[in-house]
């Protein structure tokens, strides 16, 4: 009985598929004849309409709009238009909004919702890219007749539905990032059929074809688009280097991206060269194949510090434009966000990074410098490190501190929790971390003061570095300096220093490293009556060397 049932089920499915496939399998000679008449420059011309774009990620590709953090509002479209963008890309999970039996109809209410958003864009002269996202069943089972039928049904319905909509500004991206079991070979077999499906009714619509292997630019060479089809733009992705752009991404299955949290991108020569090498691969492929390219997605994740995100975004975007690629930043307001949906405003610096002309973009946060106390430290000193900060918000207490010592590099990270800056005033504050005693030697301090937004989990990191030298106490003292005697301890008015030179300097610090008084020892007496009772550290300095480092106690008279 089971065998008979399977045979009947297969026969029924084949019958339905035959009826359905009769629509999207036109005579190849007819299609070739029509496409040979196409203007080969049309796709290059229309690519310019995409220009600078932005993705509404995590909205319509969620099972239900809003489940992944974003419901698209008309005010967002207005903000995009006002900021000077040219287009909007709409990632859409059509398979979650259609029947799973013939004729595989798309839900009317969902299609109307897509129409609404599309029209918000078109009336503002923004081009629109409609694509298929998260069709995971097709990626995993590219030979399954059910999912193939759904795939073709989507584009049959969309082709009919949008037949009269502006061909200059509405683009069809036939499938986002072919992946998993939809290998390059299988994609090259399937893609011409879906092109033909659309061309039966609409030869003028410019189509966007993604590179295989998740849209990797390295896999452009594996893409095989029929030469007869010239009205297409090729799309690729850019989230590199992944250690920076994807740090902390929780969905990764191939490696733990949490290990890269804290990775920065400051635009060093090697960092820029890596971008340029990737760009050259895309440019050379485009030139050799005479096909226009758009970067369908690129972005850096919200877990990266904001200044690094701005620097990377601005540089990468500029290189895209220098090489004639249109692009669509991913995404508007959720994971790789450029816009705060909580405050209804662009994140500081992002409009400039995505549309401006400056080579350097800042989010307004800066360091006025880094210092250590004592300035001339020995291995007997307890080191205090301070970062002097300017930022457009009030300072908060340090919530936690992480110190990592690796060889001669000392990485300090302080974490603060704060709300999104709501004012325009610039405030100064100090971040202080006590390192304790260090062995003698040369060190590089790397100080990150990181501010974590409790509402949007944004990271704003203020970074500064300095080189320090910790001296060996035995090397900076000699036999004569060892004869120095300081008394009385405790004392209330004066300290007596024996065997001291009259030109020697003294400095007295509190236990937090703050300098309380300084001067010349002179006649061997140091006045301490102005100090509050408590413990202090006395430094005696000869020329540039600290020759005595001693704890003293001041008592009330």
Image (cartoon, rainbow, N blue to C red):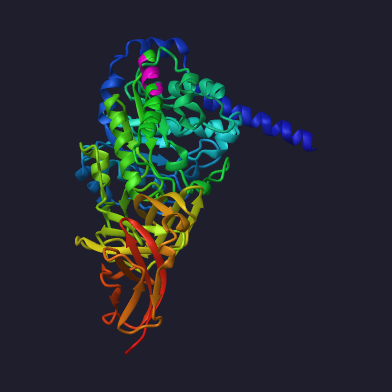
Q: Position of residue 20 (x, y in %)?
A: 52, 27
Q: Compared with residue 383, is residue 467 higher up or lower down, i.e. above or below?
A: above
Of the pair 232 and 144, the residue shown nearer to us: 232
Tag count: 0
Where, by quadrant of the figure, is residue 272 drawn? Answer: top left
Relative horizontal placement of residue 67, taking residue 507 as reference (left or right): right
Of the pair 427 and 316, the residue shown nearer to us: 427
Q: Position of residue 285 (x, y in %)?
A: 40, 18
Q: Compared with residue 385, is residue 33 higher up or lower down, i.e. above or below?
A: above
The residue positioned 51% from the left and 21% from the top of the image is 188
Q: Is residue 24 visible?
A: no
Q: Position of residue 83 (x, y in %)?
A: 21, 44
Q: Which residue ends up furthest to the right in the rendered image?
A: 1
Relative horizontal placement of residue 398, taking residue 102 as reference (left or right): left
Q: Is residue 530 visible?
A: yes
The N terminus sits in image quarter: top right
Relative horizontal placement of residue 59, taking residue 127 as reference (left or right): right
Q: Main secondary structure of the magenta part?
A: helix
The residue positioned 43% from the left and 22% from the top of the image is 195
The residue positioned 22% from the left and 63% from the top of the image is 423
Start and end of the magenta stretch? 281-287
Q: Is residue 552 magenta?
A: no
């Amino acid at each position: 009985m089971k065998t008979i049932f399977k045979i009947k089920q297969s026969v029924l499915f084949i019958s339905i598929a035959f009826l359905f496939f009769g629509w999207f399998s036109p005579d190849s000679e007819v299609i070739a004849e029509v496409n040979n008449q196409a203007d080969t420059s049309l796709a290059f011309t229309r690519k310019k309409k995409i220009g600078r774009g932005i993705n509404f990620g995590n909205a319509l590709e969620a099972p239900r709009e809003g489940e992944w953090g974003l419901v698209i509002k008309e005010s967002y479209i207005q903000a995009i238009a006002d900021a000077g963008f040219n287009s909007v890309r709409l990632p859409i999970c059509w398979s979650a909004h259609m029947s799973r039996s013939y004729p595989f109809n798309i839900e009317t209410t969902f299609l109307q919702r897509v129409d609404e958003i599309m029209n918000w864009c078109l009336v503002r002269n923004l081009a629109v890219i409609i694509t298929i996202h998260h069709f995971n069943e097709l990626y995993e089972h590219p030979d399954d007749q059910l999912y193939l039928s759904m795939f073709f049904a989507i584009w049959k319905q969309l082709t009919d539905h949008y037949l009269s909509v502006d061909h200059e500004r509405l683009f069809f991206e036939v499938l986002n990032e072919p992946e998993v079991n939809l290998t390059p070979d299988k994609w090259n077999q399937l893609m011409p059929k879906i092109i033909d499906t659309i061309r039966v009714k609409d030869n003028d619509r410019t189509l966007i074809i993604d590179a295989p292997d998740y849209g990797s630019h390295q896999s452009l060479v594996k893409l095989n688009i029929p030469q007869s089809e010239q009205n297409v733009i090729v799309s690729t992705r850019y989230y590199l280097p992944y250690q920076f752009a994807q740090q902390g991404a929780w969905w990764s299955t191939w490696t733990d991206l949490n290990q890269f949290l804290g990775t920065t991108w400051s635009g060093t020569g090697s960092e820029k060269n890596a971008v340029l090498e990737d760009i050259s691969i895309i440019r050379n492929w485009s030139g050799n194949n005479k096909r226009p390219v758009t970067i369908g997605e690129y972005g850096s994740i919200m877990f990266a510090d904001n200044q690094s995100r701005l620097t990377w975004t601005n540089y990468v975007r500029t290189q895209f434009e220098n090489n004639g690629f249109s692009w669509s930043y991913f995404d508007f307001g959720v994971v790789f966000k450029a816009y705060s949906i909580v405050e209804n405003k662009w994140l500081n610096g992002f409009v400039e990074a995505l549309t401006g002309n400056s080579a350097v973009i800042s989010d307004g946060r800066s360091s006025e410098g880094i210092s250590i106390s004592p300035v001339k430290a020995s291995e007997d000193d307890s080191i205090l490190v301070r970062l002097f900060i300017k930022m457009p918000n009030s300072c908060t207490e340090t919530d936690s501190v992480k110190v990592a010592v690796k060889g001669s590099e000392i990485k300090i990270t302080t974490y603060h929790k704060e709300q999104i800056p709501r004012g325009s005033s610039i405030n100064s504050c100090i971040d202080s971390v006590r390192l304790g005693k260090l062995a003698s030697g040369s060190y590089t301090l790397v100080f990150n003061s990181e501010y974590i937004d409790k509402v949007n989990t944004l990271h704003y990191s203020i970074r500064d570095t300095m080189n320090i030298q910790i001296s060996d106490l035995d090397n900076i003292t000699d036999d004569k300096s060892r004869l120095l005697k300081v008394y009385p301890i405790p004392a209330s008015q004066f300290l007596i220093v024996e065997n001291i030179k009259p030109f020697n300097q003294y400095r007295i610090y509190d236990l937090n490293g703050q300098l309380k008084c300084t001067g010349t020892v002179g006649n061997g007496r140091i006045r301490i009556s102005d100090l509050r009772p408590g413990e202090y550290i006395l430094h005696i300095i000869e020329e540039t060397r600290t020759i005595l480092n001693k704890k003293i106690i001041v008592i009330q008279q």
